[in-house]
Image (cartoon, grey):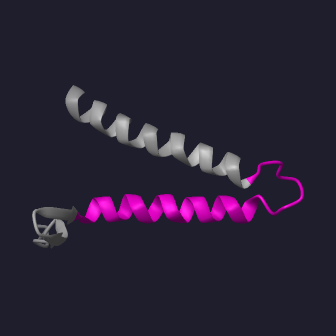
Amino acid sequence: MFVHPDINPVAFSLGPLAVHWYGLMYLLSFLLGWGMAIVRTRQPHIHWGREEVGDFLFYVVLGVVLGGRIGYVVS
């Protein structure tokens, strides 16, 4: 039999605003991905600039948020 820990999904609250753990993980993953992409653009065989990485990250975040909402509604 598996015992699952009872972890509070809310990391912290600021008044009426509750910040959840999954939101913090999304933020962390986007920031780490952005940083890793910026480091990769410094390599000579990569022909992307910082602006292109920022634009790509915008579309990735948009796709994750919209995809998550659409998946939630459909399921």
Q: Residue furthest right?
A: 44
Which residue is painted at 45% across and 37% down in the image?
63
On-image quarter of the C terminus: top left
Please state the total of marks drawn on the protein image: 0
Which residue is painted at 33% across and 65% down in the image?
24
Taking depth in this image into account, of 53 and 40 the one nearest to the observer is 53
Residue 75 in sight from this viewpoint: no
| Main secondary structure along the magenta-highlighted residues | helix
Residue 62 within the segment the image draws in magenta: no
Question: Is 38 on the left or on the right of 48, as rendered?
Answer: left
Taking depth in this image into account, of 50 and 26 the one nearest to the observer is 50
Question: Is 45 on the left or on the right of 27, as rendered?
Answer: right
Residue 32 within the segment the image draws in magenta: yes
- The answer to which image quadrant residue 38 occupies is bottom right
Residue 57 drawn at (x, y percent): 56, 48
Q: Residue furthest top?
A: 74
Residue 18 drawn at (x, y percent): 16, 63
Residue 6 in sight from this viewpoint: yes
Which residue is painted at 46% across and 61% down in the image?
29
Question: Is 50 on the left or on the right of 69, as rendered?
Answer: right
Residue 69 drawn at (x, y percent): 28, 36
Which residue is painted at 30% across and 59% down in the image?
23
Against 9, residue 61 (above or below) is above
Against 21, residue 49 (above or below) is above
- The answer to which image quadrant residue 50 occupies is bottom right
Residue 30 drawn at (x, y percent): 49, 58
Residues in magenta, as a range: 20-49
On-image quarter of the N terminus: bottom left
